[in-house]
Amino acid sequence: MSVWEALGDPVRREILAVLGGGEATVGTLAARFPISRPAVSRHLRVLREAGLVRSEVHGQERVYRLHAAPLAEVDAWLRNVTPVPRSLPGPASRLDALSTELRRGRKTRAKEMADDNRSAG
């Protein structure tokens, strides 16, 4: 199953959000959802097949943790289709602000020099 297909289910997205906060067992995850433990296990199997989670056996329990690397493709796609709000301080707006401050500084220095020249003359 692809990452995109795995992310298509809201329960799987919520499982990923929980695992983003740290590792968890099937029992811990099942307690958070109104579905059965076997259903949570099936969701985890889909996420594991998509490469989004990894698991390790600790004693009699299987512990799951998020493996975020496959989400890079989703992140790149989102950045391509999401417009960047102009209110965010990106490189262009920071350069504009720098340019404005440089002009202000030049005007201030020019005014100070003119005042000094008037005082001296």
Image (cartoon, rainbow, N blue to C red):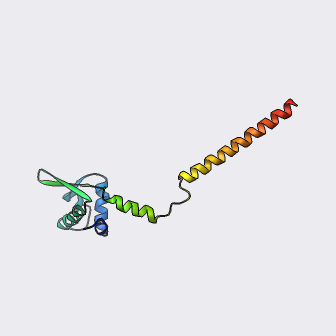
Q: Quadrant of the N terminus?
A: bottom left
User: Does residue 68 appear left or right of residue 106 in this picture?
Assistant: left
The single residue placed furthest to the right in the displayed view is: 121
Residue 95 lies, in percent from the top left, at 59, 49
The single residue placed furthest to the top in the displayed view is: 120
Q: Residue at x 14, y 54 (%)?
A: 61
Q: Residue at x 73, y 38 (%)?
A: 109
- Which of 3 and 53 lies nearest the eye of the viewer? 3
User: Does residue 42 appear left or right of residue 20 in this picture?
Assistant: left
- Which of 26 and 68 lies nearest the eye of the viewer? 68
Residue 76 lies, in percent from the top left, at 40, 60
Tally of marks: 0
- Which of 25 and 113 lies nearest the eye of the viewer? 113
Q: Quadrant of the C terminus?
A: top right
Q: Residue at x 22, y 66 (%)?
A: 46
Q: Residue at x 69, y 45 (%)?
A: 103
Does residue 115 sit above or below 60 in this rendering?
A: above
Q: Quadrant of residue 105?
A: top right
- Which of 120 and 35 lies nearest the eye of the viewer? 120
Does residue 31 sit above or below 97 in this rendering?
A: below
Residue 52 lies, in percent from the top left, at 27, 59
Residue 66 lies, in percent from the top left, at 27, 55
